[in-house]
Image (spheres, grey):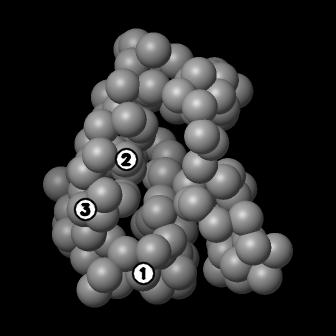
Amino acid sequence: MVYSRILVIDDDVDDQEIFVTALERAAPATECHTFCSGVDALKKLSSGALVTDIIFLDLNMPVMSGQEFLAEIKRHEALAEIPVIVLSTSAHPPTILQAKALGAADFITKPDKFNDLVDILKRIIH
């Protein structure tokens, strides 16, 4: 499946900027929205004000963690089918298992190299 509407939820603005820049290189025709808070993203999604094909989600965030966001989005019938890919600094196996148990479609440890992120996004988006 080709994804054209992307949502990124990450409380680190620098990480958001890196993601968006990598996405522009990997898939220039995509539309990308960013949120620093799972709460804000969930409100927009639930209200229908934002429609997305796929969500990239950080786990370690204040107010609502990535795990809490995953659990909450899977409770909403209209949103439950949106694939959520965790993009985290963690590579801890129990964290990965927990994310997948909560409904994450995939779990990717944030790469150290920008070009590696571009390659990952090319593989996922196309």
For the point 30% across and 63% down, the residue is 11
For badge 2, the amino acid type reads Asp
Residue 62 position within the rendered picture, expressed as x and y whole percent measured from the top left = 31, 81
Instruction: Write the residue at 50% across / 71% down.
Output: 59
Query: Residue 61's x, y, as percent?
Result: 37, 75
- Which of discs 2 and 1 lies nearer the camera? The answer is 2
Which residue carries the number 2 mark? Answer: 15
Residue 42: in sight, yes or no? no
* Cβ atoms under marks 2 and 1 closer than 8 Å: no
**Tag 3: Cα neighbours inside 10 Å, few (<14), some, or many (≥20)?**
some
Compared to residue 20, the image places residue 39 above or below, namely below
Q: Which residue is mark 3?
A: 36
Residue type at mark 3?
Answer: Cys
**Position in image of residue 91 (x %, y %):** 73, 65
Q: Which amino acid type is shown beneath numbered disc 1?
A: Ser
First-in-chain label (2 vs 1)? 2
Disc 1: CA contacts within 10 A as few (<14), some (14-19) or many (>=20): some
102 shown above or below 3:
below
Residue 84, by quadrant, is bottom right
Measured from the top left, where is residue 117 in percent x and y?
58, 32
Question: Label 1, on which residue?
Answer: 65
Q: For mark 1, give the secondary structure.
A: loop
